[in-house]
Image (cartoon, rainbow, N blue to C red):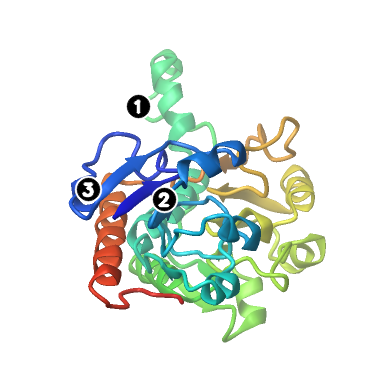
Amino acid sequence: MKIVFLDSGIVNPGDLSWEPVKKLGEFEHYKQTSTDELKERMQGVDAVLIDAFCFDRERLESCPSLKFIGIAATGFNHVDLTAAKELGIAVANVPAYSTDAVAQQAISLLLAVTNRVDLYHQSVVTGNWRDSAEPTFLTTPITLLAGKSMGIIGYGNIGKKVAEIVRAMGMNVHVYSQDREAAIKSDVISLHCPLTPETEKLIDASFISRMKDGAILINTARGGLVDEEALAAALKSGKLAGAGLDVLAQEPPLEGSPLIGLENCYITPHIGFSPAETRRVVIDTCAANLESFINGGTLNRLV
């Protein structure tokens, strides 16, 4: 069996073994693949692994030998499942692999906003604490989370894990699908829902106007859930105290992104899923899905 991974750079930049996949056939992997490179790299390929590479109907039809697509992620909106089914191409994904990692990232972003560890670390490195001659050096407020509330939009595996963590920290949780008003009026809102036509720019100026003054927004789901211009305006005006984002509408961002550089907006480059332990699960599961397909099974099959 000929196997190719078209965009392996994020899943495995070189720190993990490909052995689970290699044992299943002739295997090649590429950090990224352009449209111009696709035809050559898919010649005679039986199984393709992808992270974010898109397979629409036209691309699927251009790969006559293809029998299996393994998505090295949970989301599958970048593969035309209807076309794949019509063409007899099996598709499998890696469900719920990033729950713990993304929940950890959400909490990290929340603590970045509330505890300002970066600012206080720099006050030590630059000598400001030393020069103050004070045993404790306070330059900006720290927010206690115990007793405050979090509204969670999207109560799947990750949303539930975040709820578990913040409850252990003494926070009260309001689930948007169960009590919309209480969730919107929470001290913190954390997004964990999928991006759909219904949820695109859910967090817009109207939504923000209904949020509690001084609230914090956390987004580790999809950048398109947020109207970035509206969020930037709310952060600048003080309507919102801060935001922690692991995702943006455009990734990587274009020059002039309205959120980059705002003192009260912490942005990380879509890394929530990325601990080595988590990416190892992705590789192992992709291999298991393909092995199942080879043996006539349907492990994690979407079609």
Q: Badge 3 is on which residue?
A: 22
Circle number at residue 135: 1
Residue 268 seen in render: no
Query: Which sits earlier in the primary sequence, circle 2 or circle 1?
Result: 2
Residue 44: assigned label: 2
- Residue visible at 38% across and 30% down in the picture: 136
150 left or right, relative to 58? left
Three-letter residue code for mark 3: Lys
Give the left or right position of residue 211, taking residue 179 as reference.
right
Closer to the camera, 284 or 159? 284
**Disc nearest the viewer among 2 and 1:** 2
Crowd band around label 2 with a 10 angstrom C-alpha radius: few (<14), some (14–19), many (20+): some
Secondary structure of residue under mark 3: helix
Instruction: Tell me if label 2 and label 3 are in contact, CB under 8 Å.
Output: no
Residue 137 higher or lower than 61, as above or below = above
Q: Position of residue 236 (x, y in %)?
A: 75, 42
**Where's the N terminus, which quadrant?**
bottom left
- Mark before the other along the chain sequence, 3 or 1: 3
